[in-house]
Amino acid sequence: MSGVKIHTKEDAFRLFDEAVTALTTTNFIITEKPITDLLRCLIYSDLLRTFVTDCKKGVDYESELAAAVRETESGYAFVLPKSNKRVIALVTGLLHDFDTGARSLTSFIQSFWPNVDNNARYRLFCENVLLPYKKAFRQSFLSDIDDAEQAVEAEGTVTISDSVLESAAPLFTALRTVFAGDNKLSQKKREDLTALTDGLFYALEKGNPKIIKTIWIGLKLALDGNKKAERKFSDISEFLALYALI
């Protein structure tokens, strides 16, 4: 991890995303190291460490943990809070407990998903706790979305900051440059591909996920077989995926 360069929030989130993915895709019996690695990741990056510290402000971990346990007709359920920052504070604290041995992951999952084996319980834990944790982290860390109402509104339109657009612009310029230098393209094809690329960036500026995805699909299909352009397009795709726009 010491060789990873972190300059932006996007870089920091990729580091976090990789650590969470490693944890959610591992087998239950070997979760100890991925949990430790995730927590180290949150300490390693100044951006992540400061963000998590901010999420914990004003949050009483034990009270949040108690409030998340709900009694149902079939037993007990673990229900995350609606605030993204409280989710982050709660789940980070829970992972810390598992890491230090203050709480048992085995006992925890057996308490809330008692009628299946440990591997199935762990999958349910990932679906109901870790994946929502990653989503809450992405929304709050990258887009400053904290509550459920904001998240619902954001599904229709999202606010793309100037700094994010500035980061995206060189990726689109690189793709346009490929079109301009490709002698195999007819003038009409070159103009059409450039128009699609400009349209995708315009949709990004407007922050409409549906239009972004529609144009992205069109451009993806139009570039099929153009290896050089596809490589540049993959950079744009990775960028859009980071913000859950495709």
Image (cartoon, grey):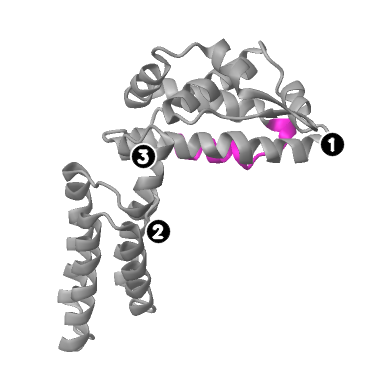
Q: Please identify the dominant SS of the magenta region.
A: helix
* Residue that numbered label 1 is attached to: 115
Q: In the rendered structure, find residue 150 and report the number of the disc placed on it.
A: 3
Residue 4 visible in rendering: no
Residue 107, x across and y down, in percent: 76, 21
* Residue that numbered label 2 is attached to: 246
Residue 36, x across and y down, in percent: 57, 23
Residue 170 appears left or right of 71: left
Of the residues shown, which amino acid type is indicated by label 1? Asn
Q: Magenta stretch?
A: 16-30
Q: Secondary structure at mark 3?
A: helix
Q: Secondary structure at mark 2?
A: loop
Residue 137 visible in rendering: yes
In the displayed structure, 227 sits above or below 43; it is: below
Q: State how far apart marks 3 and 1 are (Cα).
A: 35 Å
Residue 226, x across and y down, in percent: 33, 77
- Please state which of residues 85 and 150 is positioned toward the viewer in this rendering: 150
Q: State how far apart marks 2 and 3 are (Cα).
A: 19 Å
**Which residue occupies 64% across, 19% down?**
98
**Which residue occupies 40% across, 42% down?**
151
Q: Secondary structure at mark 1?
A: loop
